[in-house]
Image (cartoon, grey):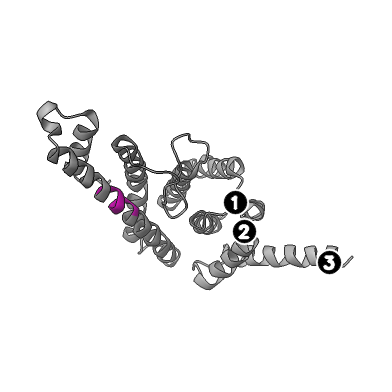
């Protein structure tokens, strides 16, 4: 009986935390409510229970609720906790399918945000066969070979091409009715962008070392290997984050 009561209290507490963090009646993303929910998830060392709670929220009828749920999921992914990847993928796909059919700038942001989290899932996929990134972009295996280094760097740069335009869109839409909501999300996206920048900087540093070593030991005298051609092309590329 005591065990049953304890489980019921825990379930009610979790439902209350999710309700407050994703409240569709408030157009503010309250950092303290989000923090309390994330602490509960981290204490459990498991994010799978959260997805069931988010599915119970009115994410298909209230865009504010849907947006807050996406912010919650992004923070959970950053925490690198256990998740049911197939269920999470299905949840994001259902959001994309629903909100694509509604013509509105705010609805398009929901679609873009959902696709961003899908891309984050791909980076964290343990079954990708080419290594995976953690929620804070640490790579799971050594990248001593130049080709592996280029592949990992390309994966991060592809992700950045979804992250940065979304962050820019949120800043440009601040005069909208959802300005206060977007302001709270910008903080989360900036945190993500900073972690991504740090990871990319490390890979670029290692790539420069590889290019320098190849030049020093006369790789150019026998022709540039494919990895070196790709590396030089990548280092000369210009950012294209603006839509």
Horizontal relation, residue 67 to residue 238: left or right = right
Residue bounds of the magenta highlight: 199-204
Q: Position of residue 19 (x, y in %)?
A: 63, 64
Q: Earlier in the sequence, mark 2 or mark 3?
A: 3
Q: Residue furthest front?
A: 217
Which labelled disc corresponds to residue 82? 1
Count of marks placed on residues: 3
Depth check, mark 2 against mark 3: the one in front is: 2
Whether residues under marks 2 and 1 lie with C-beta atoms below 8 angstroms apart, the answer is: yes
Q: Earlier in the sequence, mark 1 or mark 3?
A: 3
Q: Residue furthest right?
A: 1
Can residue 237 be seen by looking at this rendering?
no
Depth check, mark 1 against mark 3: the one in front is: 1
Which labelled disc corresponds to residue 45? 2
Q: Earlier in the sequence, mark 2 or mark 1?
A: 2
Q: Position of residue 77 (x, y in %)?
A: 51, 53
Task: Look at the image and say whether residue 201 sits in the magenta stretch.
Answer: yes
In this view of the protein, which residue sits in the foreground, 23 or 166? Answer: 166
The dominant secondary structure in magenta is helix
Q: Position of residue 124 (x, y in %)?
A: 48, 45
Which labelled disc corresponds to residue 113? none
Q: Residue at x 22, y 38 (%)?
A: 231
Q: Residue at x 55, y 56 (%)?
A: 69
Q: Residues within 10 Å of mark 1 (few under 14, many from 20)?
A: some
Read off the residue under disc 3. 5
Q: Residue furthest top?
A: 222
Label 2 to label 1, Cα distance in Å?
7 Å
């Amino acid at each position: 009986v005591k065990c049953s009561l304890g489980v019921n209290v825990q379930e009610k507490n979790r439902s209350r935390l999710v309700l407050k963090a994703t409240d569709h009646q408030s157009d503010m993303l309250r950092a303290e409510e989000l923090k309390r929910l994330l602490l509960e998830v981290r204490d459990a060392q498991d994010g799978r229970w959260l997805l069931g709670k988010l599915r119970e929220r009115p994410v298909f009828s209230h865009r504010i609720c849907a947006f807050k749920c996406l912010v919650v999921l992004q923070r959970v992914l950053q925490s690198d906790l256990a998740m049911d990847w197939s269920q999470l993928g299905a949840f994001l796909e259902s959001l994309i399918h629903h909100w694509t059919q509604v013509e509105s700038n705010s609805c398009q942001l929901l679609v873009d945000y959902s696709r961003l989290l899908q891309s984050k899932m791909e980076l964290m996929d343990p079954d990708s066969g080419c290594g995976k990134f953690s929620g804070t972009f640490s790579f799971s295996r050594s990248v001593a070979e130049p080709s592996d280094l280029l592949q990992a760097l390309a994966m991060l740069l592809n992700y950045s091409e979804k992250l940065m335009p979304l962050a820019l869109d949120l800043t440009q839409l601040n005069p909208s009715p959802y300005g206060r909501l977007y302001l709270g999300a910008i903080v989360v996206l900036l945190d993500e962008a900073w972690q991504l920048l740090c990871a990319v900087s490390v890979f670029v540093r290692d790539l420069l070392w590889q290019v320098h070593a190849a030049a020093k030991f006369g790789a150019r005298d026998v022709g540039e290997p494919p990895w070196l051609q790709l590396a030089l092309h990548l280092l000369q590329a210009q950012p294209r984050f603006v839509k």
